[in-house]
Structure formats: structure tokens, C-alpha cells
Amino acid sequence: MVHASYAIVPPQMQTSLARRRRLRRAIARRPGGRAATTAVTVLGAAAATFVASSVFAGFIGLLVLVSGYNHFSQGLPEPVAALAGIEFEQQTILYERTGKIELARLGELKRELIVFDDI
């Protein structure tokens, strides 16, 4: 039994294989065929270099950001301790003798202090 030159494939595939081989030969014979391939390779390498340098610059930026945060946050007090000692200016409230009826509020600011659990 004699096989075709493209190994053991059905006859329909042999024509497509032959068409591909002709196309490859035609591209190789063109004067700009290899130059276009080289240009695509150079553009691909440039794009890959750009992406790699962008990722590297992002990593360096993140490293600078984290180290800057650590440097400047070293001398800061704990937030809970810093907020515990804050005193707010409040109005003076005058009540009548029994303490049930409010007579007046003195002061410019109208604040009422509540604890954190009431928020």
C-alpha cells in the first residue's frame, strides 16, 4: 500500500495541507515576508519590555509607599488612647430647682456628648 506524501490522512485534508505548504513557501519567497516577521517580533519584545517595566515600577512604588507609612507612623500614639482624653466645649444648661424644667442654654456651640456605644 502506497501512502501520500503527507502521511496517513484523508484526501480532503491532503489538499488543505498542500495549500498550507504552498502559502508558507509563498510567504518565504516574498522580499518583505521575513522583515514583517522581524518587525512583529521587535514590537512584541518592546510591548513585553514595557509591561515588565510597568510592573517593576508599580512594585517599587508600593514598596516606597509601605516604607513611608511605616516611617511616619512610628511616633504616633494609639488611636483609642488619643481619642479618650479629648474634651469638647459644651453649653451650660440651667434648670429650675427640681431639675426637670430647662430654663436656658448658655454658649455658642450646641453639642450633646454621647458615648460610642450609643452611635
Image: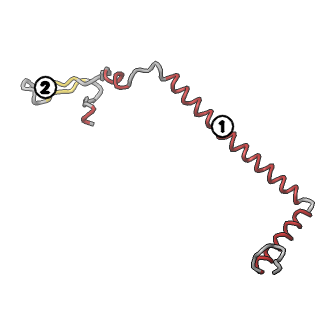
Q: Residue furthest top?
A: 75
Residue drawn 13% across the image and 25% down it: 95
Q: Nearer the viewer, residue 69 or 28?
A: 28
Residue drawn 27% across the image and 29% down it: 111
Q: Amino acid at mark 2?
A: Tyr
Judging by the rendered image, the residue that carries numbered circle 1 is 56
| Circle 2 crowding by C-alpha within 10 Å: few under 14, some 14–19, many from 20 | few
Compared to 83, does 48 lie above or below? below
Q: In which quadrant of the rendered view does residue 109 lie?
A: top left
SS under mark 1 = helix
Give x and y (percent) for residue 53: 69, 39
Compared to 99, does 2 lie above or below? below
Give x and y (percent) for residue 16: 79, 75
Residue drawn 31% across the image and 20% down it: 85
Q: Nearer the viewer, residue 8 or 89?
A: 8
**Between marks 2 and 1 in the image, the one whose residue lies nearer the viewer:** 1
Give x and y (percent) for residue 18: 83, 74
Q: Residue furthest left?
A: 98
SS under mark 2 = strand
Compared to 1, does 66 lie above or below? above
Judging by the rendered image, the residue that carries numbered circle 2 is 95
Q: In which quadrant of the rendered view does residue 25 lie?
A: bottom right
**What is the CA distance from the residue labelled 2 to the residue labelled 1?**
68 Å
- 2 and 1 marks in contact (CB < 8 Å): no
| Circle 1 crowding by C-alpha within 10 Å: few under 14, some 14–19, many from 20 | few
Give x and y (percent) for residue 2: 83, 79
Compared to 15, does 72 lie above or below? above
Instruction: Locate the N terminus by quadrant.
Output: bottom right
Left or right: 16 in relation to 74: right
Instruction: Locate the C terminus by quadrant.
Output: top left
Q: Amino acid at mark 1?
A: Phe
**Dot 2 or dot 1, earlier in sequence:** 1
